[in-house]
Amino acid sequence: MCRICIVAEQKKNRLKRATLNAITFGKKAAEKLGGELVLLVIGNGVANIADELSVFGASKIYLVDDAALEHYTAETWGHVVAEVARTCEAMIVGINSSTLGKDLMPRVAAKLNAGMASDIIGFDGEKYVREMWAGNALAEVEVITEIKVVTIQGTAFEVAEPNNNKTPIETLDISIPQTKTRFIESLEIESKGPELTEAPVVVSGGRGLKAAENFKLIKELADLLGGAVGASRASVDAGWAPNNFQVGQTGKKVAPELYIAVGLSGAIQHLAGMKNSKIIMAINKDEEAPIFEIADYGLVADLFEAVPELTEGIKTERKRLGL
């Protein structure tokens, strides 16, 4: 039996939403190959994640729960993924193409002596499709090893829908080897709002904001919509926004229900990170800005007038509706 093994990504024992996009890829790959989908959950105290995933149509969920896996390191997780892949005789092993996924899967490929395809957005049963040159070209990649390792561009696949069937969970006891590295601490920028890659709404600011203090316009609008703040590389390089806000080819890739680009021209590197958004709205005083070519709604206006008006209009409507 051909098995597709998707590794669940979690942070602080909370499932990362992009795992559900990766599951959609896994289901489609299983259908094309006449195989079955299995999931792998790794960590410490993560039985709740396995249970959460049990309604998404996999044939089995493997759970490796060990105190030595509480904090992610490529050495320990890579060992576990490779061992489980051998145990379940997986043909394809995949995970979301996140920072963790890009760090983990090359090690897994080496351990399995497997070929690897990165940032895939499609699969026809034989060849994988990935974007090149900021999405301006598509490449078909053929992996000829017996086992294939992939990272999956989650924005290219829909979120998997739950069903009424419960998937059996099998707990595996895998010996965790001593490694040359150890976890010391994680330093993170705390954010009160939703995570950028998981937010239903993203409001991004660009060079048109002119200064760091003007990002308060972006934040107020994002908070009002229950969304996250994004930024172009130009505004991050200028020091107006932190690195973890950056959207684009060298930043984070997002696909929210609504993406609002404010004072942002729309360079191809930025478009590569947000073009799969369901609805794109752009506000820019330059009617020739490239962002308008992909925007569903465009407003040619001074952002310093338009954004406060939009914010106040939403507040008024929310108040009228009693929200």
Image: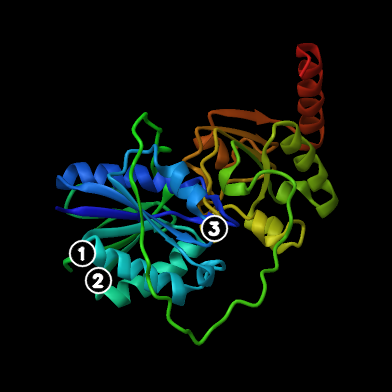
Between 236 and 243, which is closer to the camera in this rendering? 243
- In this rendering, the label closer to the viewer, 1 or 2: 2
Rendering coords of residue 43 (x, y %)? 50, 62
* In the image: residue 36, left or right of residue 173: left
The residue at 25%/71% (across/down) is 114
Residue tagged by mark 2? 114
**Residue at the far right in the pictured view:** 213
Q: In the figure, 255 relative to 183: above or below?
A: above
Q: Secondary structure at mark 3?
A: loop
- In this rendering, the label closer to the viewer, 2 or 3: 3
The residue at 35%/71% (across/down) is 108
Q: In the figure, 263 relative to 307: above or below?
A: below
Between 301 and 35, which is closer to the camera in this rendering? 35
* In the image: residue 73, left or right of residue 25: right
Residue 45, disc? 3
CB under 8 Å between callouts 1 and 2? yes
Which of marks 3 and 1 precedes in the sequence? Answer: 3
